Image: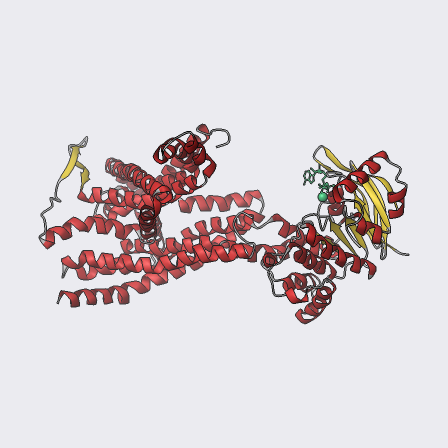
Amino acid sequence: MTGSGNIHGFTLLQYGLVSYFDELAQSFLITMELYIVGLVLGFSIGLTFAIMRQYGGRIFSRIATAYIEVIRGTPLITQVLIIYALPVAINMSGIASLPLDWYYYYLDSQGRIAITLNWPILSSMIGLGINSAAYQAEYLRGAFASITTGQLQAATSIGMTRWQSIRHVVLPQGLRRAIPAWSNEAAYLPKYTVVAIWVGVMEFLNMAKTVVAKTFLSVEVYLIVALTFFVLITLVSRFLEYIHNRTKIPGV
Amino acid sequence: MQERDFSSLLAFIITAGLPATLLLTVAGLGMGFLIGLALALIRVYAEDEIAVIAQAYENVFRGIPVLVLMLLFLVMTGWPALFSAGLALGLRSGAYQSQIMRGAILSVNENQVTAAYALGMDRMQTARFIVLPQAFRLALPGWSNEYAVVTKDTAWAGAIGVLDMVKSVDYLIFENPILYLPAILAVTIIYFVLTYPITRYAGEKMTKRLSSLGLGGNY
Amino acid sequence: MSIVLDVREVWKAYGNLEVLKGVTFDVGEKEVKVVFGPSGSGKSTLLRCINMLNPPDKGEIYLKGKSLMEEGVDLNSMRSRIGMVFQQFNLFSHLKALENVTIGPQKVLGMEKEDAINRAHIALNQVHMMEWIDHYPAQLSGGQQQRIGIARALAMDPDVILFDEPTSALDPELIGEVLQVMLDIAQAGTTMIVVTHEMGFARAVASEMFFMDEGVIVESGTPNHFFTTPENERVKQFLHRLEVLYGGQNTEE
Ligand SMILES: Nc1ncnc2c1ncn2[C@@H]1O[C@H](COP(=O)(O)OP(=O)(O)OP(=O)(O)O)[C@@H](O)[C@H]1O
Ligand SMILES: [Mg+2]
């Protein structure tokens, strides 16, 4: 309590940052929204491509391989930018006129508009999903590949069709086996949601930047952001580890 | 006419943006290599109390978005954006390369170490002449993957103002917005050209060559 | 004849499992001692105790009169004087055959590269592997790898070489070439301790044989003693089983 600078810093932290708590929390919801939709979308697309690549015959497996390698060989940022710019380009070219200024929102406790979905958010979700799908597909395929041909032959021998044996033998075993590797992807995906900044989404980090612009508490704010992501990722990965241990089947 | 606009844009992307992309890749990988090697050696060979610190480093740097790291270093050091971006990429790649290297060291067959000790080598000699040379080879596929990761992640640097390939598109696009999509596509293709051949080569050729040396993964 | 290796009352346990329960023997210069006995009797453990890869719990080991169990003894330099040939060859897989042989003299004995290569050439000649020196271990057959393994040990010019079932991982048609090399170096006066079930080899060069069971030397004697008048019931049974398995003592010569 000797230097006034200390006290000043302390009050700024106390009142300066706390007053932005609401906005930061709201933007964190957007981050979570991006994460969860991206993960689910990524899983659906990823599972499809994993099955295509492993069991789809030559053409489908080529397509799936190409998809996975192109996505993994290019940055998430440009993938999102491409998706974001696509309808804009279509509109500019005059081929069609796609509506892009729609949005969904709710009013927060102070009556402010909190946007939950618009084109920038949606394109970020799609980008995250498409990107994550390529990585998830690889983990899933790895797990499918580790299921012995004996299992498939056994399924065929009792008269199952190809699709039935995938559905009832490969998937139940493979998905369980994929959990450890898949968990890695699932737990670290939150990091990549900050990509939405590039298309102007007010997610957590973007909001933090505006708070920095207003309070000049840059180090403190970014440390809070870093810590938040770190805690989130640690929690998710612990949680998935717990799930994995709970769903173990002897010998699988 | 549009043709010429696009090619001049492409020229700008390559002359103004590509150098930063390449520089950041090299710096990030190089710094990450030194950090990763040190961390891996600590995790494998050092006392548990110290190894835990190395592990904590890995967890922290893997659990924070690289853009947040870049911003943090930018505001904390006051260095130019390029330096801060390089530092963030390097420190983070160190965390990943540590895991790659540690996995490689641990997968060196135990009997190689036994044979070295039986010849009279000490721990240092065994690590230097037997374990590390084999581990470096075993780590090649992982490294090629990490090279692709770092290359792609240099794109985040644009968000703190580094003029890299993605950022370079913004500079000229105001004049001709219709070129935005082709320009971003071009950037994406350049990234693919930078990463794919190397991961492909290391992924397939190296794995084959390694197993022909009896250094394959699960032996 | 001077004693090269003196093993006195060596005990070793892994946890609760007593593996060696007081093993005593010695090896004189140019002697070949053959150790045999059932799986799990502690033969490998004995060899790993001798070169202190797994130091004994109790007992004494002297290499040319110098104790290996003493506080502060330079184990690495002692180990460099005890060669070891492994069942699984354990060649350094990132090094070519020649480098596998030169690395010890160069890095451990501190020899100049040229001298190390000269020494390696002599050893490689002894095992008839000069044509293969530029090959990686994975490019060699098991028999060739084991011969490089022997050359690697020879090049260190050790006081004694320990062999741990050097032929038991080999296909039958490759065993002969390795045994021939072992016979040659034994006859050239190399001091050796060989764990093996190749009774033909034992008969040809062993100065003494030890039958080990459950961590102790149950019976010892010359090859002639074992093949004509073994005393212990377990020894008789074991030799009989070997005969059934390998068809008598015809593996060599
Ligand atoms: N590192 C170890 N940890 C625990 N137990 C061990 C270890 N090494 C060997 N053992 C046990 O010690 C006993 C003796 O093993 P050892 O390898 O010395 O036998 P062996 O006579 O060489 O047998 P084999 O003919 O099969 O090679 C065995 O029961 C084995 O399981
Ligand atoms: Mg053994």
At x 73%, y 38%, the residue is C40
Residue closest to the eye, A242 or B200: B200
Q: Residue B183: x, y in percent?
A: 21, 59
Residue in front for this viewpoint, C195 or A169: A169
Q: In this view, does A180 lie above or below B168?
A: above
- Whole-percent x and y of residue C235? 83, 38
- Residue A62 visible? The answer is yes
- For this view, does C106 lie left or right of residue A62? right
Q: Which quadrant of the rendered structure holds the C terminus of chain C?
A: bottom right
Q: Is residue B205 left or right of residue B158?
A: right
- Image position of C118 with respect to A1: above or below: below
Total label count?
0
Asked whether, in this view, residue B76 is left or right of residue C237, the answer is left
Q: List the single residue furthest toward the bottom.
A: C114
> From the viewer's perspective, is C27 left or right of A231?
right
Ligand 1, image quadrant it occupies? top right
Give the quarter of the figure containing the N terminus of chain C. bottom right
Q: Tell me which colouring the rendered structure shows.
A: secondary structure
Q: Which of C35 and A18 is in front in this view?
A: C35
Q: Where is residue C147 in the image (x, y as percent from the top left)?
A: 70, 58
Up/down of C35 relative to B89, above or below: above
Q: Is there any visible trace of residue A221 in the rendered image?
A: no
Spot occupied by residue A55 in the image (x, y as percentages of width and height): 37, 42
